[in-house]
Image (cartoon, rainbow, N blue to C red):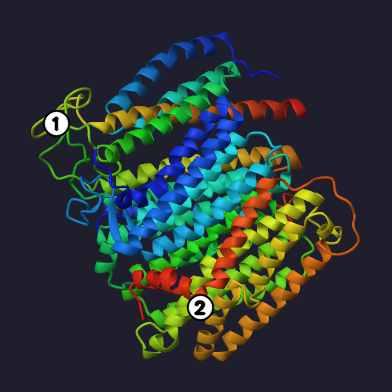
Amino acid sequence: MNVDLLTQSPVFVLAIPLLFAFLTPLANKVSKELRNAVFLIGLLLTTLFVSLMAYEVYTMGSWIYVFGAEQPTTGLTTQSFFRITFLADGFSVLAALTIIITALGAGIYSFGHMKESNGLGKFYTLFLLTLAGVNGMVLTSDLFNLFVWFEVTSIASCGLIAYHNDRGESVEAALKYMIISVIAGLLLLFSIGFFYGEYGVLNYFLIRDSMTGSLIDILAIGMVMVILAMKASSVPMHMWAPDAYSEAPEPITPFIAITSLGSLFVLFRLLFFVFRGAVETSAIGSILIILGVLSMFIGVSMALKQSDLKRLIAYLSVSQVGYMMMAVGVGFATLGTGDYGIFGARAMEGGLFHMINDGVYKALLFLSAGGIVYVADTRDLNKLGGLAHHMPYTTFFFIIGGLSIAGIPPLSGFSSKLLIYKSVYLYNPVLAIIALVVSIVTLALIGKIFFNAFLGPDQGVGKKIPRSMILAMSILTIVVVLFSLFPNYVVAEIVVPAIEALGVGA
Amino acid sequence: MNWFTVFPLIMVVTLIIMGLYVVLFKKNLIKIIMGIALMQNGANLFLVSLAYREGYVAPIWTSAPSADMVLPTPHALTLTSIVIGVATTALMLSFVMMIKKHYGTINSDEVRRCRE
Amino acid sequence: MNFKMSVVVRTVADIMIIPIIVFGIYLILHGHLTPGGGFQGGAVIASATALLIVAWGTLKDNKDDFSTMESTGLTMFFLLALLGIIMGFSLFYNSLAGTGGIFGGTVSGINPGYINTGGTVPLMNIVVGLEVVAALSLILYMMAKRSDALEVEE
């Protein structure tokens, strides 16, 4: 009986949500309070283990967790060739932190928001399963394990999107997402088959060491990139995103966004960590930049014509994904050249900092929009109005989230976007100008929502916002404010270790 | 290159093309899901055919310990992907059942209430 | 509306589920020795449910039992995996292999089919089998019920 929780922590990040996902339906048979308590304990324990993992990684360095080995830290030996391994390093911690902050917000929010729904036992089960799936995706260092968690995430999040199955639109959006996810999963399986057929291994490290860059490799890498960019809702594979975001229950919307971010984390991990040696970095980097610019521009232009609140924010979220892809693409394109030291590393910092920022403020924005929908019972911007009279807190949270997504100083979105503008300008000034214009349009759209929904004459509302929703939004607001106050600290302590973990430290 | 290694790959390509054709060109949602199931079978067959070595026996330690065995890992992967395939197919079919209830049709042209 | 089939089909279905279930249990218990295991055996047993639903048109409402069984199976699976950590090793470590007791037997060299081996693996097969039986039966049951409801509406 000698359990070292610190070295075991990465596996608990996955195991705790899974275990509590299975316990929730059992607790549901006893009483509602017990079910809620089990769910909350599961979330808090996961948070605890993410913090433990972060502590251990930042103090002791990264390690490989081998499943089923006598000691979890034995590393890769001939015996653990085919064992599932988890990789606990700076990048995993960055991803896990992004995920858990959002999940905590969404989880606490759902207590108040979903109070009157039935079948909540299954809702919380699916919620925790999605959390486990995304955590598994970002922590694993084994291609097939990645496929398994990819599918777990797809299935559980589709179940959540279709949660209000008394509405046809929800089921339609879920089916659309599901068909796309399943076909993506099949392509992923094929590319795994290619890698296995060629090298006979599935572990990231072993594939990285044996990769030669043959035609089959290029084909498989292309498929993996398409799949993960699609899950990350990058244009031109973004069709599912607005439907899924707007039809999912309000607490779940930021969670679907976090599965997108999780796929983006996996894409960057694979590109930098595994495929880097075997591909033409400037070509792949250019593809990422093009996808990013397209996402930024098309996302924000589609948002212009929306009158549905949640659809509008969904398109804004598509355009934010573009920033990260563009910045990291610049980093990838300059790898190995002298430019990387000059501005490539800054672009990476900007891109990864924007990811954790975006996960948090987007969740805040989606949750406060959910508060609007909860109170006013409509998502149509033309019918909303005067809500600031009734919900001063939510108005404040919306302003914080909205200004952050638009990149207004001094909020956190500004810090990461400034890093992106500065570094991308040196790569190609046009990119920085496009990014700036997109940012301005985003601000205009946030202004539009703000004026339509919160200002204007009091129209009277029926419901009050429950306290747990306020609490959830305040947690996220505190995180956004902390990121805004100490951007240097966040970049130095969280983002730079992540970049070093990818093996491309400046 | 002999017949036993090439034939499964031909079948894989055939299954995938059939599945893709059904997914892209059929309007009936049930048929689309059948197409996806065809593609899943193609992927599973691909993994199993990767494991095949001519003259080797099935990887069961109990029955034939002395002979050379085919690779067991892809078999494990295939089983996992079959399990996942069952779950996804069941979920998609239940979505289609709900769509039939709400929309009264399973023609993908008419199931378009989500706006652009 | 009820889709009950003729008495011949119903009687044969009632009899046939016995060998089906026995075969499923065989597959689950020998999962660590021969092809098979929790999922395969569970799917075989769940086909008995499918047979009953086809023959009788419907089943009596035991949705709650199935979902309890499902969650119990999954929870026990995870507790078995956590046993490795509790004993001081890593997750999924086979801490019961070769320790005596149930499924703790040892064989030297080639295993000729001695079932009392495998440590946690056969136990995991059993709980996965429980989970799969429950989950697949639940899916079949829900689908049968839902399509019944659709027929009534029209």
Q: In which quarter of the image is residue A364?
A: bottom right
Give x and y (percent) for residue A343. Answer: 45, 86
- Judging from the image, what secondary structure is the residue with disc 1 in? loop
Q: Which amino acid does label 1 sit on?
A: Asn
Q: Which of C83 and A290 is in front in this view?
A: C83
Q: Which residue is drawn at 25% across and 56% down?
A: B2
Q: Nearer the viewer, residue A113 or C44?
A: A113
Mark sitting on residue A122: none
- Left or right of residue C1: residue A268: left
**Which residue is denoted by mark 1 in the rendering?**
C111
Q: Quadrant of residue A234?
A: bottom right
Give x and y (percent) for residue B98. Answer: 68, 38
Identify whether A253 is placed above or below A495. Answer: above
Chain under disc 1: C
Give x and y (percent) for residue B63. Answer: 17, 32
- Left or right of residue A62: residue B60: left
Mark 1 Cα shell of 10 Å, populated few (<14), some (14-19), many (≥20): some
Q: Which residue is drawn at 28% across and 29% down?
A: C122
Q: Which residue is drawn at 34% across and 84% down?
A: A336
**Which residue is denoted by mark 2 in the rendering?**
A327
Quadrant housing the N terminus of chain B = bottom left
- Left or right of residue B11: residue A205: left
